Image (cartoon, helix red, strand yellow):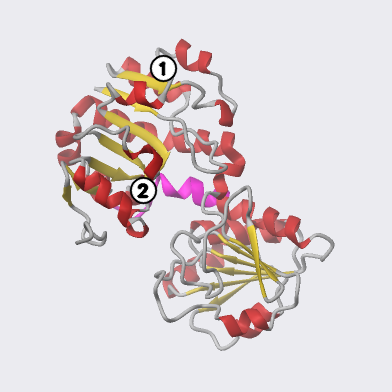
Amino acid sequence: MNIGILKEIQNGEKRIALLPEAAGALVAAGASVTMEKGAGLGAGVADTAFVRAGVEVRPSAAAVLRTADLVIKVKGPTPAEFDGFAPGKALFCFLVARNRPELVDFLLRRRMTALAFEAVQTDDGRFPLLEPMSTIAGRRAVSIGRELLGRIDLRRIVVLGGGTAGTAAAREAAARGAVVVDLFEIDTNRLQRLRTLLPPEVALHPVPSPRLADIVIAADLVIDTATVPAHSRVHLIDRATVGRMQPGRVIVDVSATVGGAVETIHRLTSHDDPVFTVGGILHYAVPNIPGLAAADASRALSQALLPYVRTLATEGIPKALERCADLRRALVCKDGALMDRSVSGPRQ
């Protein structure tokens, strides 16, 4: 199998999905690996390191796509990249297909097989490719909030959601000296587990909670990691609550690509233009926060990804899907047929 690694073109995205060590392991397993020139530079890895690992570096994405059977990226292709994919290719990346109908249309029209990093799930319910990125995003959300607050002392932080990102954010906030950290979580079983995992500075609250609005209003920084459906009419933080927050306070939405938890997060932002203001409250809604820590994020992603790519490369995609339940759960479409019914198919 020929595995192709593409350079990311989305704003501020400097990660690479496979580092030289992982690429070398694939070559040792019998795969051919080609990479677009400069794909690792954003993560601090020169092309020469890949060449030493047995990777063929090619001058453009088109040159990689001509021979790649399986294309590995960090982020799903943008419309500007669609034309480079010949029919029948396989793609493995962070797709977030539920919110990108144009991407789903493209995958089905080109009769592609696509697997989503974020949907790879183990038998015990873990998401091994998403978790390291969520941890980095949760930690960075605290630093982002501190920078945006400027001279305002970061005394009270609210975290929505007690998953991987929320737990990381709460730990980081407590370690950074926040006087009070309030974490809200809807899953009562998870809430009980968090009592043994988080420091005593973190106050835990169920959702729904009559105290949520008042605690948010008093906060300096709100970090949303919750996953409320984008078109839900019910928001954890509504527009009226945001309107009662003190001017200059900050909301960082780690789950911005899902949307819905914070009513006033009405659009995504970018690393070049990361913030918009609603009622004097700064809203940060950059969808690829781990891109700010490209080297660490690439290392964590590459290590977690290697076993799955090696399985695909050595077994072939049909047999790998048959034998590996983790990968089957990540299958969005196969040979142009939609396999994930939670994803919308082509528009009529």
Give neighbour class at mark 2: few <14, some 14-19, many 20+ (Cα, 10 Å): many
On the image, numbered disc 2 is attached to which residue? Answer: 95
The tally of labels here is 2
Q: Residue at x 40, y 76 (%)?
A: 232
The quarter of the displayed image where residue 228 is located:
bottom left
| Magenta residues (range) | 123-136
Q: Residue at x 61, y 58 (%)?
A: 169
> Cα distance, mark 1 to mark 2?
24 Å
> Does residue 57 appear left or right of residue 120 in this picture?
right
Q: Residue 244: percent from the left, percent from the top?
A: 68, 84
Q: Residue 5: percent from the left, percent from the top?
A: 39, 28
Name the quadrant of the N terminus. top left
Query: Can you say whether 22 is above or below 88 in the image?
Result: above
Q: Kindly identify which numbered label has been placed on residue 66.
A: none
Q: Is residue 121 visible?
A: no
Q: Residue furthest right?
A: 151
> Does residue 195 appear left or right of residue 275 in this picture?
left
Q: Is residue 334 visible?
A: yes
Q: Residue 142: percent from the left, percent from the top?
A: 67, 57
Q: SS at mark 2?
A: loop
Q: Residue at x 49, y 83 (%)?
A: 208
Residue type indicated by callout 1:
Arg
Q: Residue 329: percent from the left, percent from the top?
A: 25, 50
- In reply to whether residue 247 is colored magenta, the answer given is no
On the image, numbered disc 1 is attached to which residue? Answer: 58
